[in-house]
Image (tube, rainbow, N blue to C red):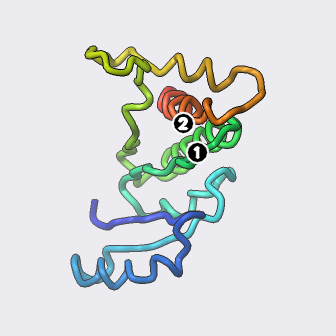
Amino acid sequence: MGSVCVALFEIRKNGKASWMPDHFEKQYGGGKFEMVQVEDMREDGCFDVAVKGCSGVVHVASVTGVEVDPHKIITPSIAFVDNALAAAEQDQLIRRFVLTYSSAAASQDRLNEVYDLTPNMWAEWAVKEAWAPPPYTMERARANYYASKALTEQKL
């Protein structure tokens, strides 16, 4: 890519990232870094401005906190990817979309057991546990995270 495009969102407000433009300019020269704040990655069209002029999108964002309610981690994680993909599809300059993700998407919940992961393996145990009826308890938080990774990656 000719330039680096960074979209900032809820966790990293522009004030906290004020050091970044100077750092990138010193490291790579002027005109190669642009910072755009995205207020809510769940909103349709939220990335449209952020991707303008970019030749590629690298999507690394996800809900990562411990969350007992699957709707608060799975639903927004899927929306983040849907919105990033929609923005990338609308801009004809964008040639690449990279989703960085987690081995949690393929986790088999087989602790202390050696096994091979294959491209067809998903954390189906986590999806089943995450979407089970309430009560939502702390014991389900891990499954919610793993399910968010599996279901989001499957959207691609």
Label 1, secondary structure: give it: loop
In the foreground, 60 or 86: 60
Amino acid, disc 2: Tyr
Relative horizontal placement of residue 36, taking residue 110 as reference (left or right): right
In the foreground, 38 or 31: 38
Q: Distance between the residues labelled 2 and 1?
A: 8 Å
Relative horizontal placement of residue 114, taking residue 19 as reference (left or right): left
Figure check: 26 above or below 122: below
Query: Is the residue marked by circle 1 packed among few (<14), some (14-19), or many (20+) residues within 10 Å?
Result: some
What residue is rendered at 59% in x and 38% in y? 78
What residue is rendered at 39% in x and 82% in y? 19
Relative horizontal placement of residue 118, taking residue 150 as reference (left or right): left
Residue identified by numbered label 1:
66
Q: Do residues under tags 2 and 1 come within 8 Å of each other at their CB atoms?
A: yes
Quadrant, the N terminus: bottom left
What residue is rendered at 43% in x and 20% in y? 109
